[in-house]
Structures are given as structure tokens and as C-alpha cells.
Amino acid sequence: MDESLTFDEKFDALGEYYEMKSPNEIRNFLKDNTGIFVLLDEVKPYLKQSFRNNQYSLEMVYDPECESCSHLVLRIYVSSKRFQNGVSEEIEYVRKNLRPFRRQYGVLSEFAIQAGVKNV
């Protein structure tokens, strides 16, 4: 990700690739977790490789028992057939390749990648 970009420019660029559910909440969360921008940029080649022609959505997830335990989820929407036939191995491949970046940028529990079923 281009480090010369402002926060607003980085955030706006996310909307070109990812659908955002509750964009204001995501914006506020990313202000305190800017390392996630790098992960969202680094994950793109893996999405293109393993999940071409799928939807990618950014969604906030909240733990009702822990106010500070919210995190951002990149949900990859696939067909129900693909979901039932083992998409988890491909998701794990993507996660594995992001681990060095997660450590480098201090993004651990604040960001997750999960599969979802596409509504057709």
C-alpha cells in the first residue's frame, strides 16, 4: 500500500475492491488499527488466485460480552456448493500467507478472514 496516501485516500480505495457493511464503523475501527490496510492490500493476490469472481465484504463483528473485543472480518462469499465442499482449506491457505504481515504490523485478533454463503 502506498504510504504517501492519507487515511481517507486509503479508506476510499478499499471501497473499490471490497463491499463495506457499516462503513462508518469500519472507518472508526481502522483509525485505531491502520496495519489492517496492509493486510487488505496483501490479501488481494490470494483472493484473485483462490476466489476469483467472488464477493469480498468487510464487516464489523462485536462481542457482546467484551466491549473492546470487536474485530474486522473479510468475508469471502462463495456458492453454497463450494462452501459445503471444503472452502476452509483455501481460506487457511490465505490466512497462512498473511501471518508474517500480521506479526509485522501487529494485527492479530483485530482482523479475521471467513467464508460466507452467497445469496443467489
Image (tube, rainbow, N blue to C red):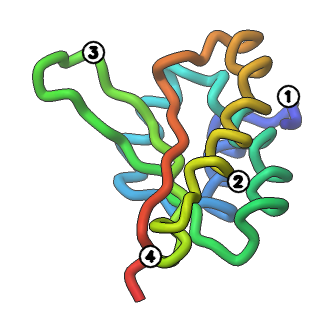
Judging from the image, what secondary structure is the residue with disc 3 in? strand
Q: Earlier in the sequence, mark 2 or mark 4?
A: 2
Q: Is residue 64 left or right of residue 8?
A: left
Q: Earlier in the sequence, mark 2 or mark 3?
A: 2
Tag 1 residue: 3
- Residue 23: x percent and y percent? 42, 51
Residue type beneath disc 3: Ser
Q: Between residues 97 and 21, which one lies in front from this camera angle?
A: 97
Q: Earlier in the sequence, mark 4 or mark 3?
A: 3
Residue type beneath disc 4: Ser
Tag 2 residue: 13
Judging from the image, what secondary structure is the residue with disc 4 in? helix
Task: Indicate the quadrant containing the N terminus: top left, top right, bottom left or bottom right.
Answer: top right
Q: Sort mark 3 into few (<14), some (14-19) or many (20+) by Cα contacts within 10 Å.
A: few
> Mark 1 to mark 2: distance in Å?
13 Å
> Mark 1 to mark 4: distance in Å?
38 Å
Tag 3 residue: 68
Instruction: Give the number of the disc on residue 80.
Output: 4
Task: Indicate the quadrant containing the C terminus: top left, top right, bottom left or bottom right.
Answer: bottom left
Q: Nearer the viewer, mark 1 or mark 3?
A: 3
Q: Sort mark 2 into few (<14), some (14-19) or many (20+) by Cα contacts within 10 Å.
A: few
> Mark 2 to mark 3: distance in Å?
26 Å
Q: Earlier in the sequence, mark 1 or mark 4?
A: 1
